[in-house]
């Protein structure tokens, strides 16, 4: 057993915590359900339903994240901004999985280190909003907070928070997880045949030749190893794959928080890797209180308003034992703000010797509205923030250990620029997101190639 594994097992969680202790704190971004009795009945029903993930999967991910903190792995976390019940289909799920596998293929080939693959799906059904209500033509209704809360149509019935949607969200999450597991166990991710992961973009993209060269090089390497050994290389026909979502809807998360045989403590068994969004990350808030007590690896979004003192207080609360793999900070500063806002946080954590995994979200700080009314992000700003993140970490003596992206395996037109130089007029062609703009499959692959090139440019080591 390694020292990292011993540390993970030795940590004890706080005794003054329970899955419902968050209820004594101020809870932001939660819907107001009109029928309290109906809500409690739904939560009782959820508590009796099977979990979506297992405790040993959670602990395996925590071990891999601990290795990412040491520079031995790189975290790729990506998926939809907000899943919808209607998009729980085989094509959408398999294409989303394909693009993440393609990205990880590029990263493994270029960085020469294992990639931790984490999908933003199988539970990303609730979203924070800037206002509790939305007004159209003088009519005010509750804001759409994701399919697990209400529906996007602007009617009183659709916008009413319905607790039974949590049951449907659990079912959709289970269907998604089941299909992903079946694909992976069935050889969908077999490195002997990475060409099977191709989406239609390979035939016409400006990036196609570069990607094909990577695929051919990996195929040649696998065949070479097998020729030398005289037998098939094992463990190349499947990969580890984990899920994540913003644990925003605390009543749902509480109902999925369980104790399990042979492991001490409490696990959130709705996902492997829950995170706290920027709007709900207050140290004295309900979400931080909930996260304080679960054994899952956890992440927090860190925005430009966070100070070094706030960051250290958050670490003290959520990882007081400095457990490896426990805590990830996902910084999202914006291309124009990262150079000023990130270095003080990196310096504070480094000076105190705090063990965290630093991840860049180059999406959320770069959102804007176009002249024709679309919410979008410019690829050049996404690229700029990501490149600056690598440079700032190198200058601070810290390590950028991952990336967090909103993306899809579909041919959408939601973010401007990229290899095809999408313009504002292109947004009208295939803008499908109900909340935030996502990278399409081609732009996502371009980000993976960018990461590899930037690490090579900086001369970053491939492992610690």
Image (cartoon, grey):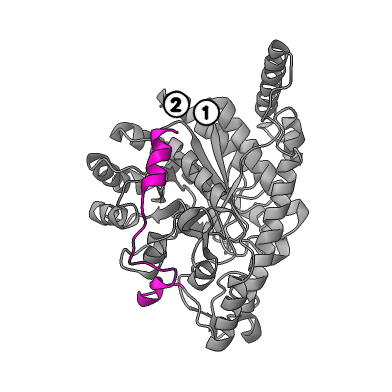
Residue 357 showing in the rendered view: no
Q: Residue at x 46, y 48 (%)?
A: 361
Quarter of the image where the N terminus is located: top left
The picture places residue 90, in percent across and down from the top left corner, at: 77, 53
Q: Which residue is mark 1?
A: 113
Q: Residue at x 44, y 68 (%)?
A: 19
The picture places residue 378, in percent across and down from the top left corner, at: 52, 48
Q: Which residues are magenta?
A: 1-29
The picture places residue 190, in percent across and down from the top left corner, at: 72, 33
Above or below: residue 368 compared with residue 348: below
Within 10 Å of the Cα at label 1, are there few (<14), some (14-19), or many (20+) other Cα atoms?
some
SS class, disc 2:
loop
The picture places residue 373, in percent across and down from the top left corner, at: 57, 64
Quarter of the image where the C terminus is located: top left
Q: Which residue is mark 2?
A: 463
Residue 208 lies within the magenta run = no
Name the mark on residue 125: none
Residue 327 showing in the rendered view: yes
Q: Nearer the viewer, residue 360 or 418?
A: 360
The outermost residue toward the front is 262
């Amino acid at each position: 057993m390694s020292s990292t594994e011993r540390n993970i097992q030795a940590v004890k969680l706080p005794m003054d915590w329970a899955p419902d202790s968050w209820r004594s704190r101020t809870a932001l971004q939660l819907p107001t359900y009109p029928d309290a009795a109906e809500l409690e009945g739904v939560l009782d029903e959820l508590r009796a339903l099977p979990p979506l993930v297992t405790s040993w999967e959670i602990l395996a991910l925590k071990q891999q994240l601990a290795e990412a903190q040491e520079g031995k792995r790189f975290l790729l976390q990506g998926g939809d901004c907000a899943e919808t019940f209607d998009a729980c289909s085989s094509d959408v799920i398999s294409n989303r999985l394909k693009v993440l596998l393609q990205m990880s293929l590029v990263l493994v080939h270029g960085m020469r280190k294992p990639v931790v693959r984490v999908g933003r799906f199988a539970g990303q059904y609730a979203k924070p909003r800037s206002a509790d209500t939305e007004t159209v033509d003088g009519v005010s209704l509750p804001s759409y907070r994701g399919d697990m809360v209400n529906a996007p149509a602007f009617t009183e019935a659709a916008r009413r928070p319905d607790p039974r949607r949590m049951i449907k969200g659990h079912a959709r999450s289970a269907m998604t997880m089941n299909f992903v597991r079946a694909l992976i166990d069935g050889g969908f991710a077999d490195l002997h045949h990475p060409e099977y992961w191709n989406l239609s973009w390979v035939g016409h993209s400006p990036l196609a030749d570069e990607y094909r060269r990577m695929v051919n090089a990996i195929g040649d390497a696998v065949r070479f190893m097998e020729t030398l050994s005289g037998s098939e290389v094992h463990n190349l026909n499947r990969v580890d794959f984990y899920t994540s979502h913003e644990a925003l809807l605390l009543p749902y998360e509480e109902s999925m928080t369980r104790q399990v045989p042979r492991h001490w403590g409490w696990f959130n068994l709705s996902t492997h890797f829950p995170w706290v969004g920027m709007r709900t990350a207050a140290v004295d808030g309900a979400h931080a209180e909930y996260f304080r007590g679960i054994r899952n690896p956890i992440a927090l979004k860190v925005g430009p308003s966070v100070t070094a003192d706030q960051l250290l207080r958050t670490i003290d609360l959520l990882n007081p034992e400095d457990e490896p793999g426990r805590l990830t900070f996902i910084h999202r500063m914006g291309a124009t703000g990262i150079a000023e806002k990130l270095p003080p946080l990196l310096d504070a954590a480094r000076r105190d010797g705090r063990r965290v995994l630093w991840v860049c979200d180059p999406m959320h700080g770069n959102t804007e509205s176009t002249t024709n009314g679309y919410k979008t992000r410019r690829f050049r700003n996404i690229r700029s923030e990501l490149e600056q993140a690598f440079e700032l970490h190198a200058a601070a003596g810290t390590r950028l250990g991952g990336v967090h992206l909103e993306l899809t395996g579909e041919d959408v037109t939601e973010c401007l620029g990229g290899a095809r130089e999408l313009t504002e007029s292109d947004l009208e062609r295939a803008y499908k997101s109900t909340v935030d703009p996502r990278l399409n499959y081609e732009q996502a692959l371009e980000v993976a190639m960018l990461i590899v090139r930037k690490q090579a440019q900086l001369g970053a080591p491939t492992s610690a």
